[in-house]
Image (spheres, rainbow, N blue to C red):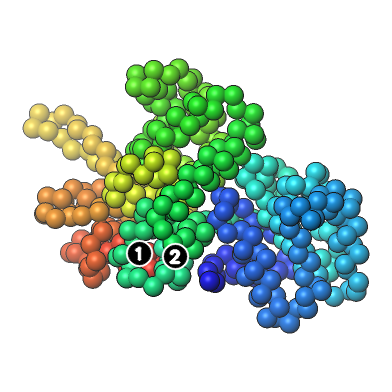
Amino acid sequence: MVIKRDYYLNQLIAGRHNGLIKIITGLRRSGKSYLLFKLFAQYLEGQGVSQDHIIKIDLEDRRNAELRNPDVLLAHIDSRMQDDKMYYILLDEVQHVPEFEDVLNSYLKIDNADMYVTGSNSKFLSSDIVTEFRGRGDQIHVYPLSFAEFMSVVTRHPIEAWQDYYTYGGLPHIATLKTNQKKIDYLKELYSTVYIRDIVERYSIKGVSELKELIQVIASSIGSPTNPNKLANTFKSLKNVSLTNKTIDNYLTYLCESFMTEKAIRYNIKGKKYINTLSKYYFTDIGVRNAILDFRQQEENHIMENIIYNELKIRGFQVDVGVVEHRTTDKDGKTIRKQYEVDFVANQGSQRYYIQSAFIMPTDAKKRQESASLLNIDDSFKKIIIVKDYIQPKRNENGIVTIGLIDFLLKPELLNW
């Protein structure tokens, strides 16, 4: 089974010979190694690059244990470079090499060396890359399978496939498993033995049970605005656990740096400024989120919102949560201020889209409710409502476009319909 990951492959192709280290990051088991060793290596061979000029080293393989010594690794790569033609150096799980930064930097000034690496979350986080490779690294961030990528390897109707996708998520291995129980077992095991361990080991966390409790709270309230103070109060009143807002803030940062979650900041659309009081947290893979909750909370409307957020991020958008203030006066002339929320403000270059995740709009009242925030935005950027229904796209008299979820996920061009 070949899973096409053209969006990321094209980024690697575009980065060829740019003089930077191509650094592939992302949630563990999201397909980084497959992208580099399978898809990119095949592309290079298809371009006429001979296999002996593609140096592939899996540093997680015990057979390559001696290459985890940085000097031995350097000597090995040097010995493979026999002429002045371009060599493509592909290193998987480079965090196994002490002082790997020095190894990678050693090839930046070699004209016929093009370096590509992957690393795992416990020792190779987003903050590390910013610190260690500022100006020298080209980061390609890999997400679990989008719904379109998922559909490329399943043969069912999209509506049936959606049920699997919103339950078990898009980690590539999930697409190879035949039974629901195997998918459940895989996700639970991955969460408890890989993701949690990465964070605990990286930050030497002692309060593991409190960390797990926090993750469960975040997982059960995706799409709900929150902050460390609010969460500390929740722990105190409902969990009978005392966690300081500082500790919670640290834990939330760790979750984002390990690529398990992402933080969406609130943005005042009319005031054109960020509001840091409350934020939303979304899970990079919805299957992992469901496994955290033992598959008990399957609210499709909240899951749909999370998946729309992920899809926008996969497409390269900067995504914020929009806030629109509307002021009116009552019969006594007193000013009434009301805030409306826009689920997503998606920006990419000069493009901007305001997007509502509405699930269903069975009544005119519900349509007015979902449109209210969009109608209070006074600029000309496109306004979109996404519904679960399998419908034809339509535009109303106010210019608001309504599209079905499946079409949104499978047809990116519909954003400009």
Q: CA distance from mark 2 to mark 1?
A: 8 Å
x and y percentages locating residue 147 in the rendered image = 41, 63
In front here: 75 or 311?
75
Residue at the outermost left position? 331
Q: What residue do we see at 34% from left, 49% from top?
A: 303
Residue annotated with mark 2: 150
Q: What residue do we see at 80% from left, 51% from top?
A: 65
Say which mark, if any, is on residue 161: 1
Q: Which quarter of the figure is the C terminus placed in?
A: bottom left
Q: Residues within 10 Å of mark 1 (few under 14, many from 20)?
A: some
Taking 287 as reference, is 379 left or right? left
Q: What residue do we see at 26% from left, 42% from top?
A: 340
Query: Which three-letter amino acid code belongs to the residue tagged 1?
Result: Ala
x and y percentages locating residue 327 in the rendered image = 22, 38
Residue 30 visible to the viewer: yes
Q: What residue do we see at 89% from left, 50% from top?
A: 71
In front here: 403 or 119?
119
Taking 108 as reference, is 282 left or right? left
Residue 348 visible to the viewer: no
Taking 314 as reference, is 308 left or right? left
x and y percentages locating residue 54 in the rendered image = 77, 70
Q: Is residue 156 above or below residue 252?
A: below
